[in-house]
Amino acid sequence: MSIVTDKKILTDEEFRGLSKDGSHYELINGELVDMGNSGMEHGNITAYLCGLIELYARPRKLGVTCDSSTAFTLKSGNKRSPDISFVSKDRLLGLKRLPKGYFQGSPDLAVEVISPNNTFEELHQKIVEYFENGCRLIWVINPDEKSILVYHKPEPDKLLQITDNLDGEDILPGFKLAVSDLFIEFDF
């Protein structure tokens, strides 16, 4: 993560246009921050889980799933992009199409997959900000430890290990996934 500009007010269109250079940005406290690229393991875990959530939620009309290219505008003006986000249908009522711009507030479910460039402080600040803006559930996935921290507030409630199951709770009712499915060893 590196700061790439001095503090500047960016319009939504200017912020969206930044992605054309191939980088992934967040706007944090008025500063544009290049979040860097993640490795293949991170990308695979994220793609797999994002796909499973979408394939579960869409036919049940529970809400929408988004990837890390989706920014959420928070009360502070920050624009944050969880690795995976899910917004429940209750917060989308009346929409025929999703906005081309940014969703106001946090997703109901935010998923962060720890990558080598994450710091504990940066991750904790995101978690606090997500909850201050309406988030109800956060999963923090640690590929190195093959574990998931589950949050309902800015402090973790549960540590899920390889023998446990991830539960969608009231946000994705009935969604269950063996934690071990996220950390498979390949035998191609």
Image (cartoon, rainbow, N blue to C red):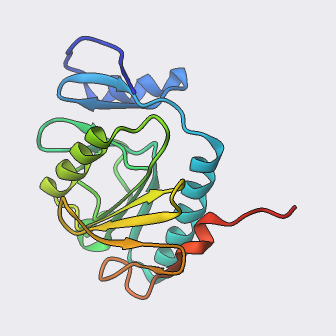
Residue 119 in which image quadrant: top left
50 to the left or right of 183: left
Q: Residue at x 26, y 70 (%)?
A: 93
**Is residue 128 in view from this perspective?**
yes
Q: Nearer the viewer, residue 148 or 110?
A: 148
Left or right of 74, for residue 34 = right
Q: Quadrant of the C terminus?
A: bottom right
The answer to whether 8 is drawn above or below residue 61 in the figure is above
In the drawing, does residue 168 fall left or right of residue 29?
right
| Displayed quadrant of residue 117 | top left
Pick out the residue farthest to the front: 145
- Residue 180 location (% of width, % of height): 59, 73
**What percent of the width, then of the height, locates residue 36?**
48, 29
Answer yes or no: is residue 94 visible.
Answer: no
Q: Is residue 179 above or below residue 114?
A: below
In which quarter of the view is residue 3 placed? Answer: top left
**Which x, y percent locates residue 109?**
33, 64
What x and y, as percent, mark residue 100?
A: 37, 44
Residue found at x 22% / y 69%: 152
For image coordinates 43% across by 88% down, the residue present is 174
Residue drawn at x 33%, y 82% as measured from the top left:
169
Between residues 184 and 108, which one lies in front from this camera angle? 184
Which residue occupies the foreground of this view, 95 or 131?
131
Q: Is residue 92 left or right of residue 155?
A: right
